[in-house]
Amino acid sequence: MRHPIRTSVVLGGVLIAALTCTPGSTAPAPSSVGLPPPPPASPGVQLPAGATTADVAARVMPSVVNVFSERKADRPRATPFLSDPFFDHFFDLPRRPGFRNPNERERSLGSGVIVSSDGVILTNNHVVDRGDEIRVALHDGRELDAKIVGTDPESDVAVLRVDAKNLPAIEVADSSQIRVGDLVLAVGNPFGIGQTVTMGIISATGRANMGITDYEDFIQTDAAINPGNSGGALVDMNGRLIGINTAIVSRSGGYQGVGFAIPSNMALQVKDAILGHGKVMRGWLGVTIQNVTEDLAHSMNLQARRGVLVSDVTPGSPAAKAGIARGDVILSVNGHATNTSAQLRNRIAHAGKAARVTLEVERDRKPRTVEVTLGEIPNGGEGGPAQKVEGGLLGGITVQPLDRAARNRHGIPDSIEGVLVTKTDPSRADIGLREGDVIVEVNRKATTTVDAFRKAAKESDDGVLLLVYRDGATVFMSFNR
């Protein structure tokens, strides 16, 4: 999962912790995506009757590697974790607050899974974030230089390649066929102590809205996974890959029985898109959505008691062109029920750019079918593209909606709503805004969308008062002609 210092979130005392062993940051890799159809599951080789857990482990371990990533240290970031002695065990960080040697190198340790005998390895994006030196250690003792073929921060998947042949590629299962209660093994390199196998069950499937990645459909397991397990294998009792270990939920930063893995079907879709096209081109509908609740259904007189409610439609988007309107309830995509916002987002994204999908929609308590040709997610994220303000007191500022990737990249909590500053013209240095600032209000009015911000900026002719979130605090900033 993502690096603890940069992306871990504490909610109600619970830490959603990264599994790598040192800091990282956002990788400069393609972040927009169109996914190919799910790859057919490898048929696998059934273990002989009476095979033991040790037989499964022996089959899997040669396919799991240790991944070492190194890069030049960033400037220090304000974080409550820098003073936590727990992280001293596996962070190579100076202990003087705010100090960082300019020549210091950050080292990240994780795991990876060989998925092709010609040297293709899957791991997590956060394991290799901006790494300029990547090495992998094989089960047979060899250490090889690795190249980052591509990464997808939105799903936290990265594809590496090493110059080697006849590697022991893992068999892959169809992760859609797993069931809660199935026995599983987790294989990786926790805390850098060496390859380790732990056992548990599948605790849940389809976990989403965890705030770990943009696209979440996690397998939850109680198999012990810890920092260093990131990118390692979650396998069934036939020794077949069903997931890439990614995150844990913990009050201490260590194993407490709740871990998450990216399903193998999703990981292989991303891998095939990166190898085939250099990036993933996810489908885009252009709607703001929320889950249908009993209260919403009652107050809006909806027939449906499930589905995804459309609360806004982006002008000019595929949804707008197809006639989707605010207040519609989307019940299914291509015949597959969408009971949650996460399910709808994943199905639309995985369908890919230019795909034609059939939506079952409820409007005015009546069902209807809508055909939509999807677009590609704009550069600014699902909420819409980045836009530059022209003229006026705020002219020269470029902003984009706050999406999950932006929150993770800049450490912005979910409680903050506004628009993210992505760029300011050099000629507007007088404004004092900088990349990563969140503009929460303009003239005491909330600006939760780019359109709202642009409208407020246009109306600010003589003076403007901004409420800005920066470095963990909100501050007022005023400008006058």
Image: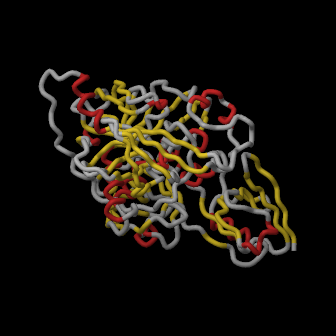
Residue extending farthest to the right is 481
Tell me: 466 left or right of 307.
right
Residue 401: image quadrant is: bottom right
Q: Residue furthest left?
A: 49
Return the x and y of residue 410 as percentages of the image width and height. Answer: 63, 51
What x and y, as percent, mark residue 166?
Answer: 22, 47
In the image, 311 versus 451, the foreground residue is: 451
Q: Nearer the viewer, residue 96 or 430?
A: 96
Q: Quadrant of residue 241?
A: top left
In the rendered view, tell whether residue 464 sits above or below residue 295: below
Which residue sits furthest bottom?
A: 391
- At x 79% / y 73%, what residue is drawn? 393
Q: Give the residue drawn at x 41%, y 68%.
A: 375
Viewer can see residue 206: no
Does residue 160 sit above or below 322 in this rendering? above
395 horizontally vs 48: left or right = right
Q: Quadrant of the C terminus?
A: bottom right
Give the quarter of the image for residue 63: top left
Q: Compare residues 258 and 241 and report the one nearer the observer.
A: 241
Q: Is residue 22 left or right of residue 428?
A: left
Let me know if residue 147 appears in the view: yes
